[in-house]
Image: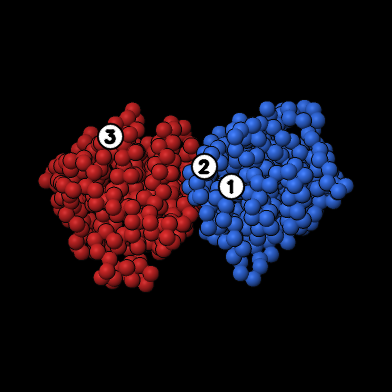
Chain colours: A red, B blue
Amino acid sequence: MSNVAAPTQFVEVSGQRYAFRRFGAGSGKPLLCLQHFTGTLDNWDPAVTDPLSSVREVILFENAGVGRSSGEVPDNISRMARHALAFLDALSIDSCDVLGFSLGGMVAQQMAQDRPSIFRRMVLVGTAPRGGDDIMHLEKPNLAQHFRNPALRGYEVLKKLFFVSSPTSQAAGEAFIRRLAQRQEDREPLSGPNVAAAQLAAFREWERAREDRFADLEHICQPTLVVNGVHDDMIPVSNSYRLVERLPNAVLLVYPDAGHGSLFQFHASFTRHVKAFLASDAKFAPY
Amino acid sequence: MSNVAAPTQFVEVSGQRYAFRRFGAGSGKPLLCLQHFTGTLDNWDPAVTDPLSSVREVILFENAGVGRSSGEVPDNISRMARHALAFLDALSIDSCDVLGFSLGGMVAQQMAQDRPSIFRRMVLVGTAPRGGDDIMHLEKPNLAQHFRNPALRGYEVLKKLFFVSSPTSQAAGEAFIRRLAQRQEDREPLSGPNVAAAQLAAFREWERAREDRFADLEHICQPTLVVNGVHDDMIPVSNSYRLVERLPNAVLLVYPDAGHGSLFQFHASFTRHVKAFLASDAKFAPY
């Protein structure tokens, strides 16, 4: 099975419809995948989801107001986490693993805070703790230039935002957007400005530090794998440093020559590491 | 073969005798192992060297003035690197892989600067770039307390210096010093205060930043794996962050609940990662 062909499914909970895809199989718990800023189910790179689906069931989730999920996009991470928990409840999943990328990594952290039993192991990629630094400031010149560039059509802007300027990284970006285009039918509608606005508001709220900055991370005891590209302009790698410094049980993996989309650039390495990490039943994160 | 039993060998180059051990086999290049502050050949944990020696020849090197190597301990990293290169020349090894731990990681970086062809792939553990932060300040109260504690005999001080205070890390430290004691015969003499004094002088010299801090790292293009414990009081993890931020081709792996001796604490994970990293012939570090 593949995210190129897996049908979009729907589940309804008290009037709220969630879109999702579910494919693959394995003896372990399912792997819930939580998506990045404005991303839909179609933004999951098959080079990441498909190898993982060979060892366990992968569940791609579309939060409220995104793609064909109904309702309003929440303007804070807490409400996004509540939606994701309601979705898992609707599927009668009381424990799973999670892969949270960027915004999705924040939602995963909030879910683990709100319901510690929900995740067995967590993979957090290109994300930040509450109170983190320089989170998704799209107004920064090095990011804004790409949004303002009319030559970048469709997914081409992702090649600039998720990859660094080196020829190797840009070539990986080119391959990435080709893979995203492989799915021809049953695609999700693109996110509009309302999705972006609400999710940016959520980033601003998440960026505000609580009194004891990062102390809440000490309650997330799940074995966790934190992954980042070393040159990430959207959510700098320093946020991943802070995550592993305060999470009690987290391994950090940082990729060179890579930005926000390190998992897509090094998909073969990334899925190998995630498979090894998820295959472990040890109490400790090192794999 | 094992570091518990491998005989100490000697090679002489223009009047300078180097002690070393050489064991294991594999199709790849040999793996040169460069040791930490005051460490001798006997300080290489068999739980690290032995699994690696199952996939390639491991060469443990004792620098000048340490153990049964003759001569004076150099008081700077450059001269230590020259000794290590002279040793490899004496063994007719013109290219190998390297595992440099702490002081040994600095020597490895200097060797790569001085002779770029010498290393195919590099593993740098618990180390720092030239100009790094807070390198081996044994006068800091949290380190000095262990040196001053008369209850810590022999290797017991290593349990305090290389491991964090958690019960899990201390238990790993206990197991580590038991493993170091396994070798009964043909042991090296312990390092005396003259070794410590010269190596501390080398740390102070290495800590001095050059004009463009860390810029020299951009010339080390070998695929590199950088490893650190997240709570390292001897050479803080920030030094490993700086390494991967400026080395063009380096992956970072950080372990939780671990200090300077993360490779000994998580020896099973560490050797698995190092084997996978060294097995790759790719131009890029990700494995």
Real-space Cα distance between discs 3 and 1? 36 Å
How crowded pointer 1 is (Cα within 10 Å; few <14, some 14-19, many 20+) is rated as many
Q: In terms of sequence position, does the residue under pointer 2 or pointer 1 come before the other?
A: 1
Find disc 2 in the rendering and name its residue.
B280
A239 displayed left or right of B2: left
Point out residue A120 in the picture as x, y percentages from the top left corner: 37, 36
| Residue at x 74% of width, y 57% of height | B78
How crowded pointer 3 is (Cα within 10 Å; few <14, some 14-19, many 20+) is rated as many
| Residue at x 41% of width, y 63% of height | A165
Amino acid type indicated by mark 1: Arg
A48 displayed left or right of A217: left
Point out residue A127 in the picture as x, y percentages from the top left corner: 38, 54
- Quadrant where the N terminus of chain B sits is top right
Find disc 3 in the rendering and name its residue.
A24
Q: Secondary structure at mark 3?
A: loop
Q: Does the residue at mark 2 contact the one at mark 1 (Cβ under 8 Å)?
A: yes
Find disc 1 in the rendering and name its residue.
B121
User: Which chain contains the residue that carries disc 2?
Assistant: B
Same chain for the residues at labels 3 and 2, yes or no? no
**Rendered image: mark on residue B58:** none
Point out residue A55 in the picture as x, y percentages from the top left corner: 34, 33
Amino acid type indicated by mark 2: Ser
